[in-house]
Amino acid sequence: MVSEVMFCSLTYCGRPVRLADLMEEHQEELATIESIDSGAVYTLALKTHVGMSIQTFRYFAGWCDKIQGKTIPINQARPNRNLTFTKREPLGVCAIVIPWNYPLMMLAWKSAACLATGNTLVLKPAQVTPLTALKFAELSVKAGIPKGVINILPGSGGMVGQRLSDHPDIRKLGFTGSTPIGKQIMKSCALSNLKKVSLELGGKSPLIIFSDCDMDKAVRMGMGSVFFNKGENCIAAGRLFVEESIHDEFISRVVKEIKKMKIGDPLDRSTDHGPQNHRAHLEKLLEYCEMGVKEGAILLYGGKQVDRPGFFMEPTVFTDVEDHMFIAKEESFGPIMVVSKFKDGDVDGVLQRANDSEYGLASGVFTRDINKAMYVSERLEAGTVFINTYNKTDVASPFGGFKQSGFGKDLGEDALLEYLRTKSVTVEY
Ligand code: NAP
């Protein structure tokens, strides 16, 4: 019932637009909080973490009054005429559980679609990054969203997250996080009351760089594919496959660029690379590097904690990474470039290696040959393929993984379906 009431108020009172306006008015404050809480450099926090969150609320606010069904003629051969029409209904109370890498943006990607479709929500932010979610709650009250529609519930995954998964009155759980926790949540949602679930999980996204690429762009975007948001990026290129004839040049140019990166205080506007999100994560990344060295990959650059207070990790490059190695298979979620060569011209061979993963979140290809780019994009097993670009997510483009990177979409029109149910009404006349 609350959902039906909300659907009307959100649709006709412009409150989601007001919420986006308020977020924009407070964007510098939100970016500062996000930067302090997550370690993202302020400039990125302002443009991406906060900027895209505002765009997401505006985009989904535009959908509020466009949630429609279909009319479907049925059984036309009978003497009586029949017609089915479908209605898209909200699900009711939805739970949302998010990680710590883009705290506000992950909140926005799910909450905006959930609210636009007329649901109410209970959101659990990550324990280590709850602050922008709490500021958002304050702004939602100012925007006139009625009490009880947006509920922010900080706490641990094992306690609050688990309780949301098990709760008998919650009809949907939207989750972003790791694959093991995603599986656990899906099991709990099934065993409790068969909640609808969408899962945006981990990735090990391949990026294939052919020798006929625009090298300047491939170096710049290849670096962004790994080091953006200090590697704490679910679509980060987890593995770069570089064609043999340009491999050495590519690597030496990447290392030259890394040396120019300014590592330091994330609130300083000139910083390129801030600290990792929290201590345990930094320690995990250092172990990941040790594992790479132990298995025989070449640690060409970095691999250590930066010698200054805070959880700073050197941007790192591994080369000569073989397919069986741990670092070739598992996500680091940090600033670690993992590079393998492939033989000149071996398009099908590199595709096979790129697809030999249980993950399928994103992927990329750099080449000037459009036929090759299309051939590769059709065969890459990933929910997103970037051609001659990377990290280009947009509020209008559906986003979500294949295989063990999960299912269901955030963003774009597709995201609305994650928070709706379809009712068929059949009339005989
Ligand atoms: P995580 O350990 O899976 O945690 C994600 C969220 O789940 C946190 O809020 C966590 O709570 C909560 N949680 C933990 N146990 C739970 C349980 N039993 N029931 C319900 N909730 C529970 O992931 P993370 O380390 O925060 O984030 C990194 C992972 O997220 C990476 O694998 C990354 O690729 C993935 N990710 C995916 C996307 C995507 O769109 N596909 C986007 C961003 C990140 P706590 O606060 O207690 O930790």
Image (spheres, rainbow, N blue to C red):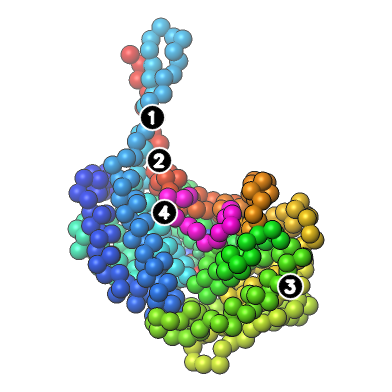
Q: Residues within 10 Å of mark 2 (few under 14, many from 20)?
A: some
How many tags in the picture? 4
Q: Which residue is mark 2?
A: 421
- Up-down relation of residue 136 to residue 375 (above or below): below
The crowd level at tag 1 (other Cα within 10 Å; few <14, some 14-19, many 20+) is few
In whole angstroms, how far apart are the C-alphas of marks 4 and 1?
Answer: 25 Å
Q: Foreground mark, 4 or 1?
A: 4
Distance Cα–Cα, label 3 vs label 4? 37 Å
Q: Is residue 407 magenta?
A: no
Sequence-wise, the earlier of marks 3 and 1 is 1
Mark in the foreground, 3 or 1: 3
The residue labelled by disc 1 is 70
Asked which quadrant contains residue 325, the reply is bottom right
CA neighbours of label 4 inside 10 A, class few (<14), some (14 to 19), many (20+): some
Vertical relation: 219 (above or below) 84: below
- Nearest the camera: 214 or 329? 214
* Magenta extent: 385-398
Q: CA distance from mark 4 to mark 2?
A: 22 Å
Q: Earlier in the sequence, mark 4 or mark 2?
A: 4
Q: Position of residue 384 (x, y in %)?
A: 56, 53
- Say whether residue 108 is visible: yes
Q: Position of residue 289 (x, y in %)?
A: 67, 79
Give the CA distance from mark 3 to mark 1: 56 Å
Task: Name the quadrant of the N terminus.
Answer: top left
Name which residue lies at 41% across and 54% down. Answer: 395
Residue named by callout 4: 395
| Disc 3: which residue | 248
Instruction: Using the image, tell me which numbered label, if any, was put on residue 267.
Output: none
| Main SS category, magenta section | loop
